[in-house]
Amino acid sequence: MQYRELGRTGLKVSEIGLGAEWLERHNAEEVKEVIDCCERFGINILDCWMSEPNVRTNIGKALEGKRDRWIIQGHFGSTWQQGQYVRTREMDKVRIAFEDLLIRLKTDYIDLGMIHFVDEETEFHRIMEGEFLDYVKEQKEKGVIRHIGMSTHNPRVAKLAALSGEIEMILFSINPAFDLLPASEDLNTYFAETYEENLGGIDPERQELYQICEQRGVGITVMKGYAGGRLFSAQTSPFGVALTPVQCIHYALTRPAVASVLAGYDTPEHVKAAVAYETASEEEKDYASVLANAPHHAYSGQCTYCGHCAPCPAGIDIAMVNKLYDLATMQEEVPEAVRGHYTALSANAGNCIACGGCEERCPFDVPVIDRMKKADALFQ
C-alpha cells in the first residue's frame, strides 16, 4: 500500500481507503471481516458519515484495541431522528449525534472532523459565519477533533472551503463522469441517466478546484469514485463504455491534491478488487485509452495527467510539468512553491527535443510540444 500526505494536516493516509457507508447493511461479524481485510492490505483511513446507531456500534467493535491504526473521518450534522438519517444544522441535535459517534466508535477523538454534506453556497456561508463552525472549532481546541474538514459534491462550495483558511481538507466526489459536469447544488444532477452531448473535458471549475487545493495544501479524500457503480457497465456509463475499479481509482488519484480514494465495500472481495490497484500494471490502470475511444464525451485536447506521454527520451516527467504549468498559470505570478517543484525536476520543459513521441502516444491529442515551450517560457 502506498501512502500520501493529506494536504498540510501532517497525516499520511493510504491511497485506497474505506468509505464505510455500505457497512450499514451488514451485521457485526461481516463488518469486522471487511475492516480486518482492509487492515491486512494496509488501509488506514475510513469515513463514517452514517448516523444509524448499529453501524456505528459495529464499526466501533471492529476497531476496538486498534484505534491508533486508523485515521477516522467523522461528521458533524449527520443525525439519527425517529429511525432515519437526517442532515441538520440544529445545534442541539448536532451535539448529541457527534457525542454518540464518539461513544459508539469507542474513541475520545476523531482525526478529521467533517462538516457534513454542504452543497449550497448560501448554506456554506451560514455555517462558516455561525455557531456551527464555532462548535466545530471548539472541538478542535479541546482535542476532540484534530483537523477540520468538509464534505461536498459542489465544486463551488469546495472552492469556497479551500479558500476559507478554516477547512483543512475536503471530502469530494471525483470520477471521470462527474468531472465533466458543471457545478450544481442538486446531487441528483450528477446521476442523470444521460448527459448533454456537448460536454467535453473536465469542467473548468473542477479543474480550478483541484489546482487551488494543491496550491494551498488542502488535501482531498474522494467519495463516489465509482459514480455509484454506474461506470462499471457500458449501459449505465455516460461514456458508453465500462471502466474497472482500478481505472476509476487511478483517474481519481491523478487529480491534483487527492490523497485517498474511499471506496465502499460489502465484502472482503470488494476490498481486494480495490487494493488490486497497488499491484496493477499500467495497462490495467489505463483509463485514458478507454475514455479517448468512448462514443461519448472524449477529453480531446485536455491533459488529464494520465502518463501516456511517457517515456520521454529527454527524461521529462511530462505529466508533472503539465500539472505544475496548470498550477502556475492560475496566478498572475508563478508561486514560489510551484517554481521550486519545477526547478527540482531532474529534467524540465527546456530539455524537450520536440521528437513528438509523446504526442503520438497521447490519447487526447494534447499539443505536448507546444505546452513544453509555454512551460519553459513561464518558468524562466
Image (spheres, rainbow, N blue to C red):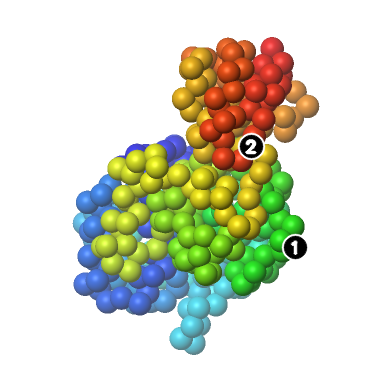
Q: Which residue is mark 2?
A: 365
Which residue sits at x=46%, y=86%?
Answer: 83
Q: On the rendered structure, is 109 left or right of 356?
A: left
The span from disc 1 to disc 2 (Cα, nearest Å) is 40 Å
Measured as percent of width and height from the top left, residue 316 is found at 52, 20
Which residue is at the front of the view, 39 or 295?
A: 295
Which residue sits at x=54%, y=25%?
Answer: 357
Mark 1 is surrounded, within 10 Å at the Cα level, by few (under 14), some (14 to 19) or many (20 or more) other residues, namely few
Which residue sits at x=67%, y=39%?
Answer: 301
Q: On the rendered structure, is 328 left or right of 247?
A: right
Which residue is at the front of the view, 92 or 214?
A: 214
Which type of secondary structure does the marked residue at label 1 adopt? helix
Measured as percent of width and height from the top left, residue 362 is found at 57, 35
The vertical placement of 50 against 211, above or below, is below
Which residue is at the front of the view, 329 or 23?
A: 329
Give the farthest residue toward the right: 332
Measured as percent of width and height from the top left, residue 310 is found at 48, 28
Closer to the camera: disc 1 or disc 2?
A: 2
Q: On the rendered structure, is 224 left or right of 368?
A: left
